[in-house]
Each structure stands twice: as C-alpha cells, then as structure tokens.
Image (cartoon, grey):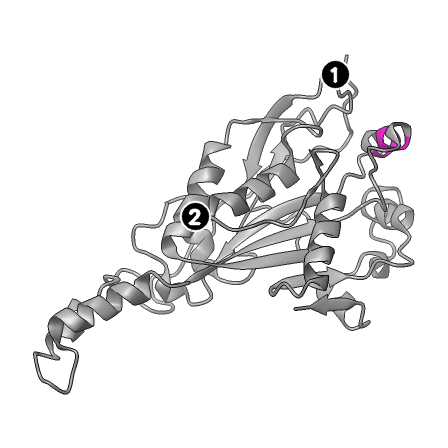
C-alpha cells in the first residue's frame, strides 16, 4: 500500500455573497455605445464609430491580475537526496503553490463572468478568486510507484494565505482571465500526484494557460513549491516586475512546521508571521 500523508483538509468553504447595493453597477454593458452616440460626428470628436473603436481597444487591454503564491514548509525537498526527500514527504512538509485572480477595479468584471468565480472576484483584493490543486480526503502518496490519488481544485484556497514566501503577478485581459478559469475548471476532477501533477503543476500550467511565461518551478522534472520559490527568486534577480521574495536565511523550518501542525500549534504566533508582518523586517523584496 502506498504511504499516505497525515495532511488532509476538508473543503467546507462556500462562495461569498455580494450586496446588490454596494459598489458600481456590474450589470451595465462593457461597451459604451450610449455615451459614444452623444458624441455625434463632430470634427472635434471621435464620432460614434471612433468612440466604439476606442472602447473596443480599451477592452482588450489588461484589466485583471493573476497572482502565483508559494509557501514553504521545509528548507529543501531535493530529488538529489531521495531518502531525505521521502522523509520530508512522509512528514507532510511539502509547502504549497496556489493562484488567485483579481480585478483591481471590480467594475471591470464582465457581466458574463463564470458563476463559480464571479462572487469571489467581486469581493476584490489580491486573494480574491484563489484556487489551488489538492489531493482528496485520503491525502497524497509518498510512494513514487503508486502516487496518483483523487484530486480537487480548492476554491477559495486560503489555507496558506498570507504565509507566502514568494509570489509573481501578471496583468491579464478579459480573454486571458477566461483562459485561466477554463483551465482551472478542466482540473476539477483530475488526479493528484506529488511526483506528477500537484499544486505547483496546477499553478505553472495556469500561467501558461494565460499565455504568460512562468518562472522555472521544477527540479529534475518534478514541480514543487521549493523549486517555484527558487524560480521566482531568480526571476527577481533578473529584474522581473511583479515579484515578491522573502529572504529565508536563518529560518527554522522545523519550528515553523511544528508551530503550524504540531502539539505547540498556536502557542507562538511570531513563529509563523504573515507576509505583511515579515515585510517590516526588511527581508521581503518586491519588484
């Protein structure tokens, strides 16, 4: 029988509700034909056709963001040291990589947004529509010869929210948002493998679905949070915009993991600070 991690998590979250009174009217058409018609055909204005053309051009520009977040729970999961990697996997200290879609201006959310994603997006914020790929209730298998188990897309995926150690963000058009959502929805019933298709694979492929270039997130062909962290760190050194990296030098990962999941969980809140708290230390760098 394959070895199963003790790390499992039930998904009891429900989509948030939104007030019909708050914020701009999200039901108004994306086009602005009514306003354009008032411009007429005057030589000192763009005219009806020109205004509609401008609206169409603006609609094709970036309106949203795709964020990729990475949290670590072990200093290294090296496939160069299989025995050590196996110990880490059996412990469950695998970390996590997940994504989130955001419309900084929620009035730009299309009226035909996918029903499973619209309520989260309308909530706003950098974690608005968060998604990650997880094993099912049985947990994952650390046996590379028998590693595939049932999987699921968790939405919202807030288990590691605020604990990310690195992130990278991309500007997206409406169409690119749709491509990410289409990809995520296609993985609702996919199988999970810590060695094959896992949370980092899901995040990396989501970036590709948006037509963007993801940093390296693999080691020896295996996607993992530690490799994603290193990939984002290298991208930041090259000057890639939209990256955040926390310098983890001196971090006691055993203590961090114990604080989260062990018998001392919750007794020392400073052992596992949020990224906002850690940023005050000066170790967090953004580009």
Name the residue furthest bottom.
44
The N terminus lies in which quarter of the figure?
top right
Q: Which residue is mark 1?
A: 145
Q: Quadrant of residue 251?
A: bottom right
* Magenta run includes residue 183: no
Query: What residue appears at the point 68 percent right and 68 percent down from the top-left corner?
Result: 286
Disc on res. 12: none
Place of residue 50 in the rendered image (x, y in percent of width and height, measured from the top left)? 17, 72
In this orientation, does residue 214 appear? Answer: yes
Asked whether 232 or 112 is in front, the reply is 232
Spatial CA distance of label 1 from label 2 is 36 Å
Place of residue 10 in the rendered image (x, y in percent of width and height, measured from the top left)? 63, 35
Disc on res. 117: 2
Place of residue 156 in the rendered image (x, y in percent of width and height, measured from the top left)? 55, 46
Provide the major secondary structure of the magenta segment.
helix
Q: Quadrant of residue 140?
A: top right
Query: What residue appears at the point 42 percent right and 51 percent down from the top-left corner?
Result: 177
Task: Please tell me which of labels 1 and 2 falls first in the chain.
Answer: 2
Place of residue 2 in the rendered image (x, y in percent of width and height, measured from the top left)? 76, 16
Asked which secondary structure carries label 1, the reply is loop
Q: Quadrant of residue 287?
A: bottom right
Name the residue furthest top.
1
Query: What residue appears at the point 70 percent right and 44 percent down from the top-left corner?
Result: 96
């Amino acid at each position: 029988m394959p070895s199963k991690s003790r790390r499992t998590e039930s998904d009891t979250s429900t989509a948030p509700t939104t007030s019909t009174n708050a914020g701009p009217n999200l039901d108004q058409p994306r086009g602005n034909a009514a306003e354009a018609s008032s411009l007429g055909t005057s030589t000192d204005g763009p005219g009806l056709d020109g205004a509609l053309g401008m609206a169409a051009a603006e609609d094709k520009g970036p309106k949203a963001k795709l964020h990729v977040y990475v949290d670590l729970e072990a200093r290294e999961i090296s496939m160069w040291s299989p025995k050590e990697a196996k110990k880490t996997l059996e412990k469950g200290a695998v970390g996590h990589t997940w994504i989130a879609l955001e419309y900084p201006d929620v009035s730009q959310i299309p009226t035909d947004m996918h029903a499973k994603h619209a309520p989260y997006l309308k909530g706003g914020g950098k974690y608005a529509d968060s998604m990650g790929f997880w094993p099912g209730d049985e947990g994952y298998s650390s046996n590379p010869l028998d590693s595939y188990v049932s999987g699921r897309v968790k939405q919202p995926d807030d288990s590691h929210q605020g604990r990310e150690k690195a992130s990278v963000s991309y500007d997206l058009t409406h169409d690119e948002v749709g491509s990410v959502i289409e990809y995520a929805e296609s993985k609702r019933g996919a199988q999970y493998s810590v060695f094959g298709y896992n949370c980092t694979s899901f995040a990396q492929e989501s970036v590709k679905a948006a037509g963007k270039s993801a940093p390296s997130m693999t080691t020896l062909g295996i996607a993992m949070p530690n490799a994603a962290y290193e990939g984002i760190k290298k991208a930041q050194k090259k000057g890639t915009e939209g990256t955040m990296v926390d310098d983890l030098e001196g971090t006691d990962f055993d203590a961090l993991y114990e604080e989260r999941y062990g018998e001392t969980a919750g007794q020392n809140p400073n052992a596992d600070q949020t990224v906002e708290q850690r940023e005050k230390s000066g170790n967090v760098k953004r580009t």
